[in-house]
Image: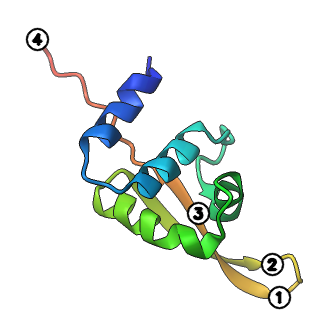
Amino acid sequence: MTTPTDVLDPALASDISDRAFRLFCAITTHPADADDPWVAIPPIAERMRLTPHQVRLPLAELRKANMVVSQRRYETGSTGRKTWHTYVRLVDDAPTEAAA
């Protein structure tokens, strides 16, 4: 079972900026679907009271620290036009159990 301390301790020990840490916390605590672990950036940015553009640099820090992975999807936006949307999820770091 994963506890909040298990998830946040590596982030606290890393050399990421405060804004990147806030973004990591927002991603970690954002409710995700069981079917789709990917979370769109706009709702995360809105929770942080930032624009999606302001989240780009902290997101790059988290990717560089191998804490999250992201993907871009070509989708229809709210205006009906096709546009790119960025989605993010935590890195799958579940350790494999070795035989003792």
Instruction: Please report contact status of discs 2 and 3: CB closer than 8 Å, yes or no.
Output: no
Residue 37: give x, y in percent of width and height. Answer: 59, 46
* Whether residue 72 is visible: no
* Relative image position of residue 79 (x, y in whole percent): 89, 83
Q: Is residue 49 above or below residue 90?
A: below
* Residue type marked 4: Ala
Give the quarter of the image for residue 69: bottom left
The Cα atoms of the two marked residues, 4 and 2, are separated by 52 Å
Considering the numbered disc 3 on the image, is that residue within a helix, a strand or a loop? strand
The residue that mark 2 highlights is 77
Q: Amino acid at mark 1?
A: Arg
Viewer-nearest of labels 4 and 3? 3
User: Closer to us: mark 4 or mark 1?
Assistant: 1
CB under 8 Å between discs 4 and 1: no
Going by the image, does 31 lie left or right of 89?
A: right
Question: Which residue in the structure is indicated by mark 4?
Answer: 100
Pointer 1 residue = 81
Q: Is residue 87 left or right of residue 2?
A: right
Considering only vertical position in the picture, is 72 above or below 98? below
